[in-house]
Amino acid sequence: MRVILLSDVKKVGKKGETVTVSDGYGANFLIPRGLAKLSTEQTQKELARDNAAEEARQNELKAEAEKIAERLEHIEVKFKSKVGKDGRMFGTISPKEIAEGLEKQWGIQIDKRKFIDKYPVNALGYARLKIELYKGSQGQVIGTVIVHIEEE
């Protein structure tokens, strides 16, 4: 029996693949649980249409991420921090605070979990942090943001 998988099934295949399984496994397990549907000419056309739509959506997401990466090259996120007598900074600036700073200062929304360099910035001056803006079938887009910390 040939079926089209509607979700990933361990040891069978990934979502969207057309696989051959035994008749009992397909009819009694995969299809009733909504994990697959019978492969017919109509369902193959639907799968091709869905794949084309997903491909277009991924291209759009990648193009948007590339625009953001290009914009981030010219952006500097500024923070002020208290400094001790020896010139060392009190506390740190976390990726969460940097993401909030990008939102407030430049209107760019980035998830704090997308930072590749997850270390907190704890020194005055400039720091460059890498951000993974897109990861998918089309490749990967990484942007760099410059963080500037001044004395308060």
Image (cartoon, rainbow, N blue to C red):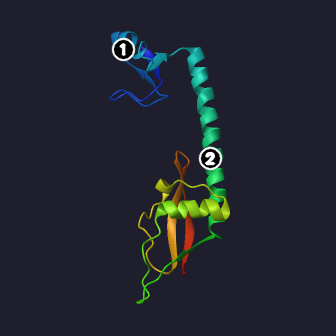
In depth, the one of 22 and 124 nearer the eye is 124
**Which residue type does callout 1 highlight?**
Phe
Q: What numbered label is drawn on residue 14?
A: none
Could you tell me which residue is drawn at 43 percent across and 14 percent down?
Answer: 31
Q: CA distance from mark 2 to mark 1?
A: 35 Å
Circle 1 — which element?
Answer: helix
Examine the rendered structure and indicate whether residue 36 appears above or below residue 15: above
Residue 70 visible somewhere in the drawing: no
Q: Residue at x 42, y 23 (%)?
A: 19
Label 1 sits on residue: 29
Q: Which sits in the foreground, 19 or 66?
A: 66
Q: Nearer the viewer, residue 75 or 54?
A: 75
10 Å neighbourhood of mark 1: few (<14), some, or many (≥20)? Answer: few
- Towards the viewer: 44 or 97: 97
Which is more N-terminal, label 1 or label 2? Answer: 1
What kind of residue is marked 2?
Leu
Name the residue beneath numbered marker 2: 61
The picture quadrant where one finds residue 84 is bottom left
- x then y, percent, for residue 1: 41, 13
Q: Position of residue 10 (x, y in %)?
A: 34, 29
At 56% from the left and 21% from the top, the residue drawn is: 44
Crowdedness of circle 2 by 10 Å Cα count: few (<14), some, many (20+)?
some
